[in-house]
Image: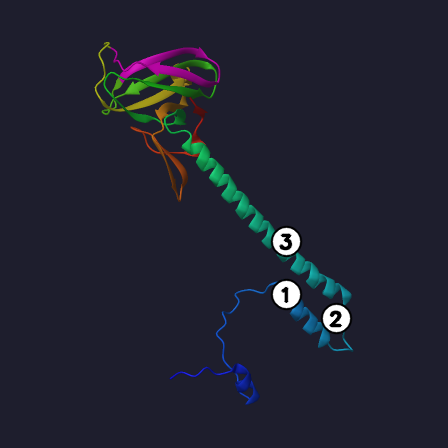
Amino acid sequence: MTTAIDSNALTTLGLSVRQNREAKAELGQKDFLTLMTAQLQHQDPFKPMENGEFLGQIAQFSTVSGIEALNSSFASLSSSLQSNQSLQAAQLVGRGVLIPATTAVVQAGDGMSGAADLPVSGNGVVEVLDSAGQVLQTLDLGTQPAGLSYFNWDGLDRSGNAAPTGSYQFRARVGNGSSAQSAEMLLVGGVSSVSLGSNGIQLNLPGMDPVSFSAVRQIL
C-alpha cells in the first residue's frame, strides 16, 4: 500500500524532497540581473564597482540580448522567405523555364530551344553534338549584340534527317577563327515537379539534370 507523503511534513522534520530539474544551458535575463544584484550586495565597500564597469556589464548584456533577438528575427524571416519560394516554385510545374544547361535528352522528331549568353557582340553560332561528340548540326545566329541570343533546333541533322532519340550536347561561341569566344548555354526545359531538400528548392525537368530554383533565368 502506497501512502502519500506531505512535503510540508518532511520539511518540518528537517528533510526535503529532491526534485529533478533540468540544468539550464545558458543564463537568461532574470539570471543575469540576479547575479549582478548579488555582486553589488557583496562587493567590498572599500573597493566598490566602478561606474564604468557597471555600465559596461549592462551594455554587454544588452548587446547579447539584442543579438539573440536579431537572430530570432532572421530565422523567422528565412523561414518565411523559404515558404514563399516553395510556393512560387510549385507554381512552375507544367511551365517551361530557361536554365543553364549543356545537355538534354531529345526525343526523335522533337527539337530543342534555348539561348546563348554572348559575352560580346559578334557572330553567334550554336553547335549540336551527338553522344559520340560529333557535330550533328550547326546553327548560325548571325551578328548579335552581347547578351541572350535565342535559337531553335528543329531536331534535324545536316542532311535534313530527324535525329534519333538520345542525349545531345549544345555549345555556343561568338566570333570567328582565333577571336572566337565560348558562350554560356541555356536550354528550355519543362518543370515536372519540385523537390525540397538540403540543397534547397530543386526543379525536376525530364531529360535534364535537376536545377536550383535560383538558377532559372526566364519563365516561359
Q: Are marks 1 and 2 in contact (CB under 8 Å)?
A: no
Using the rendered view, name the quadrant where residue 89 is placed: top left
Looking at marks 1 and 2 on the same chain, the residue that comes earlier in the sequence is marked by: 1
Image quarter where the C terminus lies is: top left
Q: Which x, y percent locates residue 150?
A: 41, 16
| Amino acid type indicated by mark 3 | Gly
Q: Magenta stretch containing residue 147, yes or no?
A: yes
The verdict on residue 215 being magenta is: no
Question: Could you tell me what secondary structure mostly forms the magenta stretch?
Answer: strand
Residue 116: % across, % down: 41, 20
Q: Residue at x 36, y 26 (%)?
A: 94
* Magenta residues, start to end: 136-158
Say which element carries label 3: helix
Q: Which mark identifies residue 66?
A: 3
Measure the C-alpha gap from mark 2 to mark 3. 25 Å
Judging by the rendered image, the residue that carries numbered circle 1 is 30
> Is 101 placed above or below 57 here?
above
Give yes or no for contact between labels 2 and 3 (Cβ–Cβ under 8 Å). no
The residue under the point 23% across, 14% down is 162
Circle 1 packing at 10 Å, graded few (<14), some (14-19), many (20+), is: few
Which is nearer the N-term, disc 1 or disc 3? 1
In this picture, residue 117 sits left or right of residue 132 = right
Element type at marker 2? loop
- Cα distance in 3D space between marks 1 and 2: 21 Å
Residue lying at the far bottom in this picture: please name it: 13
Residue holding disc 2 = 49
